[in-house]
Image (cartoon, rainbow, N blue to C red):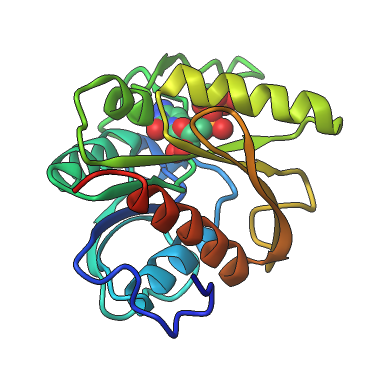
Amino acid sequence: ASARGENHDLAGRRIVVTAGGTREPLDPVRFLGNRSSGKQGVAIAEAARARGAEVTLIAANLEVADPAGCDLRRVSSALELQAAVTEAARGADAVIMAAAVADYRPASISEQKIKKDGSGDGLTIELVRNPDILAGLGHAPHDGTLLVGFAAETEPDDGRLLELGRAKRRAKGADVLVVNRVGWNEGFASDDNSVVILGGDDEIVTRLHGTKPSVAGAILDVVVSKFAHTAE
Ligand code: CTP
Ligand code: CA
């Protein structure tokens, strides 16, 4: 299969992609966020569309233009993303979880803007865990839906990075995991990405450094090959 989108090897497939980074509200004007731009997820949605898939894009605070031709559902927080992806995943051929989902959210959302306190020189915010959306999908029955997760890791050592990715794939019940090194200057807003794609037996399927569209093509090549190995 070509990664360039001239072929329609995803025709007749329904693919759900999550992209961007969640924002967890603190009060009407503030949130806790992360540096995900949505570039990689949007590149996957665009490439899947070009290869003939019907694409639902669940978009969390994208910093890039909306892709054309996708069923776009905007969300902001992790809980909103969970509701949208859980609904869209029903009967989908694949769910690709490229979004950076906040692990924690503020325990309560203030109705009013939080004011500085005259006396203290610090502020403590209590956080509670968000649900692990991918693990929730992976541990529920999902026959016929291929689950592709990402792992964002800052681990510098290659061997350790792979170990972290393998453990993450198993913990979440994902069929494919894209291990992505991130850092101050790597991953997020950049145009390139370095990834290792792990399959269901923890084998390395692909190792690639390239533009986000080329990484998107490689991920979809793996998705197509997994479809080919699954009985209809
Ligand atoms: N993910 C999710 N729900 C969360 C957190 C993450 O569905 N609450 C998904 C991400 O979309 C990604 C994968 O899980 O596909 C891995 O995200 P990552 O942050 O790398 O892993 P975590 O399991 O959150 O582990 P940690 O951040 O502690 O390394
Ligand atoms: Ca996380």
- How many marks do you count on the picture? 0
The location of residue 16, given as percent across then percent down, is 28, 54
Q: Is residue 156 left or right of residue 212?
A: right
Q: Is residue 89 left or right of residue 164?
A: left
Quadrant of res 27? top left
The location of residue 170, given as percent across then percent down, is 49, 20
Q: Nearer the viewer, residue 92 or 115?
A: 92
**Vertical arrangement, residue 180 with respect to residue 82, above or below:** below
**Residue at the spot x=63%, y=18% of the render?**
122
The location of residue 110, given as percent across then percent down, is 31, 28
**Vertical arrangement, residue 58 with respect to residue 144, above or below:** below
Residue 118 visible to the viewer: no
Work out which residue is located at the far bottom of the displayed protein and give it. 6
Quadrant of res 153? top right
The location of residue 26, given as percent across then percent down, is 39, 32
**Residue at the spot x=13%, y=42% of the render?**
90
Q: Is residue 81 left or right of residue 199?
A: left
Residue 88 visible to the viewer: yes
**Residue at the spot x=40%, y=73% of the render?**
46
Q: Nearer the viewer, residue 18 or 121?
A: 18
**Vertical arrangement, residue 176 with respect to residue 19, above or below:** above
Q: Nearer the viewer, residue 71 or 205?
A: 205
